[in-house]
């Protein structure tokens, strides 16, 4: 475990093997095995990025951590998780908002009964979503919809946050703005984060720690602490140096675009 | 915040209204033309079996005065309502289960195909023979005719449920009841609406047949009676009332319901 994970583990993930019955599933590894011998723990309040090429099984691993996929060999332990309650705040590759509910109702949908509804609505205000709280999601731009999805994940005040390429297919400036917003919220609320991406630059911008997932079936190839100071700049000097160093040591590290 | 600009402006009201008004005008014109054409043909044919609009209107006024048409229509509407509710509830339940459970679907698919293809008349005869010429048999016969159609439509809807949205609800541990009402059911709404619309149209027709064959009252029974007297003006008067009623239900219940529940699409 890295230095940043000094606190107690918020999540312990052990996946000895994950296979898909129909070999056509993601990964398509031998015998349908997608993930093998993966073990890691995320420290309390740690921002952990899971990095790997597209289709290597990142989303599969995230679904296992979220409790959406229970068909695997291994165990996910989340101390303090309560049965019947969300294990984590989740943000998916697409916003997955309910189009027939207004922005505010989309948040209300996921609130546990004892949650403070006003706090959730105040969160909307803080995220500059106040003016659209009674608007239906399909009247919002893609960037705004992602923002609402992020608000929904934070609305349940999660101790664990799971994000699956939440800013993919957004234009650069919008994605940068949302990354900034995510980091601000994370610093305020301090949930433990598992953030999936295939973009090395994004990982360097966000992570306390990067887990490289690779191979077929996928395993953890590298577990790297990132101790660059925050706030970090896209294309900043230290960031760029780390990127070059990583690419030199680890040429398979996926880096689609050059900052 | 640049993204705020992307909020769509409220739809411009005026052209929509103008179009609606023009549409209403066309509707009225079409009804007027239809009635005129009917009157013309009736006048030319000059036959007892094709009364003109005025003769039918006179008959209608007579029925309204003695109140008989209200009683008959009320009884028939009650039968329509009860069998409609039963058919929608049972058909939806079957459709949803079959759409969500592939194994059950494989097993029951051929049953459904058979049920869809049994003629309404056969169901009615069998119900009357097995359960007697009773109210229960009549309602049952109508419902059984409609249930497979509702089931097929809702099965389609249940198959089209978005697994991503269901996974989202599961990840956030949305309680079962709320998940059903706010995540699952709204996805079925277009299918429910289609089933309800076609259901009403079919059910009221079948109710008339059921009444003709085995009930001592209602519009269907009365139509049979006038058929024996060859009183076509009376037959048309009853038909007119019922068509107008069904149109009224569409306008007063289905349209507003649809507008309310699909407001988010606008």
Image (cartoon, grey):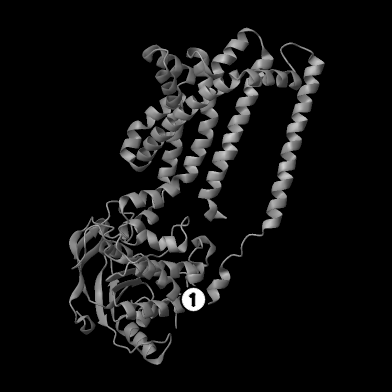
Residue under the image location 73 percent in, 37 percent down: B28
Quadrant in which the C terminus of chain B appears: bottom right
In the rendered image, the vertical position of residue B167 relative to residue B257, given as above or below:
below
Residue A165 visible somewhere in the drawing: no
Question: What residue do we see at 57% from left, 12% from top?
Answer: B224
Name the one closer to the observer, A72 or A94. Answer: A94
Location of mark 1 (residue): A174
Q: Could you tell me which residue is drawn at 61 percent across and 65 percent down? A: B9
- Above/below status of B127 relative to B164: above
Whole-percent x and y of residue B263?
Answer: 54, 53
As drawn, B231 above or below A223: above
Compare residues A86 and B122 and report the one nearer the observer.
A86
A20 left or right of B246 in image: left
In the rendered structure, the answer to whether residue A207 lies left or right of residue B83 reads left
Residue A114 image-quadrant placement = bottom left
- A110 left or right of B145? left
Residue A81 image position (x, y, % from top left):
21, 65
The answer to whether B165 appears left or right of A222 in the picture is: right
């Amino acid at each position: 475990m890295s230095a940043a994970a000094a606190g107690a583990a918020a999540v312990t993930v052990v996946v000895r093997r994950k296979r898909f019955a129909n070999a056509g599933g993601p990964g398509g590894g031998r015998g349908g095995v997608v993930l093998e011998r993966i073990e890691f723990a995320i420290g309390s309040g740690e921002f952990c990025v899971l990095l790997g090429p597209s289709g290597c099984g990142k989303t599969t691993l995230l679904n296992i951590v979220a409790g959406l996929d229970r068909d695997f060999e291994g165990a996910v332990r989340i101390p303090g998780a309560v049965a019947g309650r969300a294990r984590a705040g989740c943000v998916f590759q697409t916003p997955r908002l309910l189009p027939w509910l207004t922005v505010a109702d989309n948040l209300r949908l996921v609130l546990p009964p004892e949650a403070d509804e006003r706090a959730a609505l105040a969160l909307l205000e803080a995220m500059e979503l106040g003016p659209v709280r009674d608007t239906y999601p399909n009247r919002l731009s893609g960037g705004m919809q992602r923002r609402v999805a992020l608000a929904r994940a934070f609305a349940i005040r999660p101790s664990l946050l799971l994000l699956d390429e939440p800013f993919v297919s957004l234009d650069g400036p919008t994605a940068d703005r949302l990354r900034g917003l995510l980091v601000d919220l994370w610093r305020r609320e301090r949930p433990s984060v598992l953030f999936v991406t295939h973009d090395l630059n994004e990982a360097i911008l966000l992570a306390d720690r990067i887990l490289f997932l690779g191979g077929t079936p996928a395993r953890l190839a590298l577990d790297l602490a990132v101790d660059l100071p925050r706030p970090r700049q896209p294309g900043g000097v230290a960031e760029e140096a780390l990127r070059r160093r990583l690419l030199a040591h680890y040429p398979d590290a996926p880096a689609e675009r050059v900052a | 915040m640049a993204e705020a600009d992307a909020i769509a402006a409220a739809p411009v009201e005026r052209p929509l209204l103008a179009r609606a008004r023009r549409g209403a005008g066309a509707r009225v014109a079409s009804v007027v033309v239809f009635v005129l054409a009917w009157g013309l043909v009736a006048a030319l044919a000059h036959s007892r079996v094709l009364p003109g609009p005025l003769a039918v209107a006179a008959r209608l006024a007579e029925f309204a005065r003695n109140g008989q048409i209200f009683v008959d229509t009320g009884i028939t509407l009650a039968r329509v309502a009860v069998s409609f509710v039963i058919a929608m509830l049972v058909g939806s339940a079957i459709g949803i289960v079959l759409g969500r459970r592939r194994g059950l679907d494989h097993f029951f698919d051929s049953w459904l195909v058979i049920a869809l293809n049994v003629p309404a008349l056969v169901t009615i005869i069998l119900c009357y023979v097995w359960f007697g010429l009773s109210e229960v048999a009549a309602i049952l016969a109508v419902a059984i005719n409609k249930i497979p159609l509702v089931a097929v439509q809702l099965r389609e809807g249940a198959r089209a449920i978005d697994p991503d949205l269901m996974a989202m609800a599961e990840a956030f541990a949305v309680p079962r009841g709320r998940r059903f009402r706010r995540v699952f059911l709204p996805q079925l709404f277009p299918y429910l609406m289609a089933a309800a619309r076609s259901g009403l149209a079919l059910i009221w027709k079948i109710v008339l047949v059921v009444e003709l064959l085995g009930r001592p009252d209602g519009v269907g029974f009365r139509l049979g009676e006038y058929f024996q007297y060859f009183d076509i003006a009376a037959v048309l008067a009853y038909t007119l009332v019922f068509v107008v009623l069904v149109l009224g239900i569409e306008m007063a219940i289905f349209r507003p319901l649809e507008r309310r529940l699909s407001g988010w699409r606008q």
